[in-house]
Amino acid sequence: MVADDSIAVAGAIGLMLRLKGHTVKTAHDSREALLALGKEKFDLAIIDLMTPVMGGCELLSKIKSDDRLKDIPAVVLAGENREGLKARALALGASHFFVKPFKPKEFIDAMEKMLNEEPF
């Protein structure tokens, strides 16, 4: 699951993961993402902090407080690296934090390791 209001970012991430053989669903707001997460099984949630309807931190909090969803690894994307933002996302349960723009190879390598349950 990729939750990002930017069609370009969601599309690029989706393409990178599809090229590695993964199935990807995108949501362009947090409500859409939460509904999809409740209906389907996902191996990974990639969440932009600036997702519309509710922010990415609130979406992450809802995922991690839901017994059905809490074990899904969550990766947080941020448009800036404000002080404390990474610490807050990790404290809420994010497995990893990336600041946009990120290096595609580093990002996809980290996602592959998470999907293969390898520590990174």
Image (cartoon, rainbow, N blue to C red):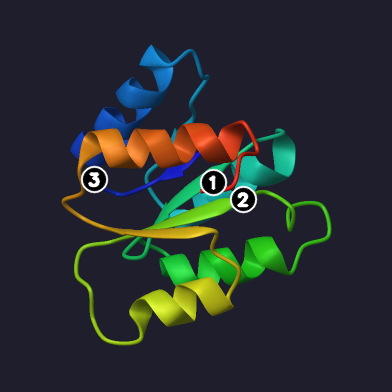
Which sits earlier in the primary sequence, circle 3 or circle 2? 3
Does residue 106 appear to the left or right of 56 in the view shown?
Answer: left
Image height of 46 relative to 70, above or below: above
- Provide the residue designation for mark 2: 73
| Amino acid beneath label 1 | Ala
Please name the residue shown 25% across and 30% down the image. 12
Q: Depth check: 76 or 28 in front?
A: 76
Task: Tell which of 35 and 43 is nearer to you.
Answer: 43
Q: Where does the image place residue 77, in percent across and percent down from the top left?
A: 34, 57
Disc 2 versus disc 1: nearer the observer: 2
CA separation, marks 2 and 1? 6 Å
- Tell me the residue that label 1 is attached to: 45
The residue at the point 56 percent across, 79 percent down is 91
Is disc 2 in contact with disc 1, using a CB cutoff of under 8 Å? yes
Give the secondary structure at mark 3.
loop
N-terminal of the pair, mark 2 or mark 1, is: 1
Q: Amino acid at mark 2?
A: Pro
Residue 118 in which image quadrant = top right
Which label is found at residue 6? 3
Q: Residue at x 23, y 45 (%)?
A: 6
